[in-house]
Image (cartoon, grey):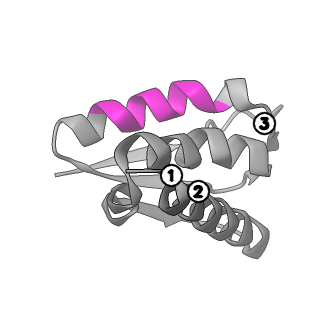
Amino acid sequence: MQTQIRLSRDSSIRTYGMRASAIPYRTEIERSLSSGESVVIDFAGNDVTQSFVDELIGALILKEGRQVVSRLAFENCTNDVKGIIKFVVHDRVRQLQKMPA
């Protein structure tokens, strides 16, 4: 099964920037992943900051390991959003590799 998570379509929000605003989405992602589902995150019409993506995805990588990324898919990302996601994933995977076993 697959869960689709869309960032809010609230017209007053164009950019998700604060870490705190990512937590409810991450909680929903964690719930779906723990049920054995994969998750599609839809960024349609939204911009995000590195802090938001780090709280959304980076925290998952640190908690679950790099394999969690294979259970996530990203839709409707601008080139900037794609770049931020790639940076966060690479940075957190690199951090995991440096941690003592």
- Secondary structure under badge 2? helix
**What residue is shown at x 31% (from left), y 59% (from top)?**
71
Q: Which residue is mark 3?
A: 11
Q: Left of 54 or right of it: where is 14?
A: right
- Say if residue 7 shows up in the picture: no
Comparing labels 2 and 3, the label whose residue is closer to the camera = 2
Q: Identity of the amino acid at label 2?
A: Gln
Q: Secondary structure at mark 3?
A: loop
Per the model, the C-alpha gap separating discs 3 and 1 is 41 Å
In this rendering, the answer to whether 33 lies above or below 24 is: below
Which one is in front, 9 or 65? 65
> Of residues 88 and 45, which is closer to you in this image?
88
Badge 1 vs badge 2, beta-carbon distance below 8 Å: yes
Which residue is under mark 1? 99
Magenta region, residue range: 22-31
The rendered magenta stretch, by its main secondary structure, is classed as helix
Image x and y of residue 69, in percent = 40, 61
Left or right: residue 4 compared with residue 14: left
